[in-house]
Amino acid sequence: AADVLEHLENLPTYLSKFANILKPAGKLLVSGPTENLLYKLGRVAAGFHGKGDYHHTNVNRLIEDITAHGFRHVRTVPIPFPILPSLFKVCEFSSE
C-alpha cells in the first residue's frame, strides 16, 4: 500500500481485509509521507499549503493503527536518507 492508506476514511475496514487476504507469515508493506517540518516546507515550496482534507492520518499514526490491528511491526526504513529527517517511511509488517 504505497502512499495511499493515509487517504482512507475507514482504515480499520481495509486492515481487516488485509488480515483476511494475507497468508500466515504474510508481509504487508506500507509507505507514506512523514508530514514533518521538512516535508511541509517542500510542500510550501511546491505551491501547496496545508496537508489537505484528503489526508486523514500520517505514516507514524498508520504504524500505531496497523500494529493495534494485530500486525507485527517488523521494521521501518526512512526515505531518502536515514541520517536526515525523512520525507517518507516504508514500513514492513507481518501477519503473525
Image (cartoon, grey):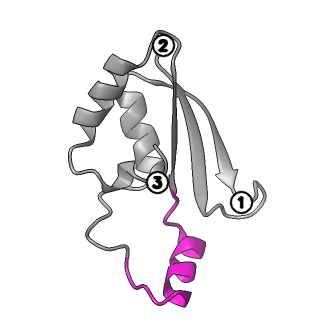
Residue type marked 1: Pro
Counting residues from the N terminus, which is met first, the one under dot 2 or under dot 3? 3
| Magenta segment boundaries in residue numbering | 33-50
Q: Which residue is mark 2?
A: 96
Q: Residue at x 59, y 51 (%)?
A: 89
Residue 82 part of the magenta-drawn span: no
The residue beneath circle 1 is 80
The disc, 1 or 3, on the residue closer to the chain's N-terminal end is 3
Q: In this rendered view, identify the residue nearer to me: 74 or 21.
A: 21
Comparing 1 with 36, the one in front is 1
The answer to whether 8 appears left or right of 95 in the picture is left
* Left or right of residue 14, residue 64 in this image: right
Residue 40 covered by magenta stretch: yes
| 2 and 3 marks in contact (CB < 8 Å) | no
Residue at disc 2, secondary structure: loop
**Label 2 environment density (alpha carbons within 10 Å; few <14, some 14–19, many ≥20):** some
Viewer-proximal residue among 65 and 88: 88
Q: Is residue 91 above or below residue 28?
A: below
Q: CA distance from mark 1 to mark 3?
A: 15 Å
Q: Residue at x 60, y 74 (%)?
A: 38
Between disc 2 and disc 1, whose residue precedes? 1
**Inter-mark Cα distance, 2 to 1:** 29 Å
Rate crowding at label 3 as few (under 14), some (14 to 19) or many (20 or more) other CA atoms within 10 Å: some
Residue 11: which quarter of the image?
Answer: top left
Q: Secondary structure at mark 3?
A: loop
Q: Looking at the image, is mark 2 or mark 3 nearer the viewer? A: 3
Q: Which percent across, then down, holds residue 22?
A: 42, 19
Q: Amino acid at mark 2?
A: Glu
Mark 2–mark 3 Cα distance, whole angstroms, equals 23 Å
Q: Amino acid at mark 3?
A: Asp
Q: Which residue is mark 3?
A: 3
How many numbered circles are shown? 3
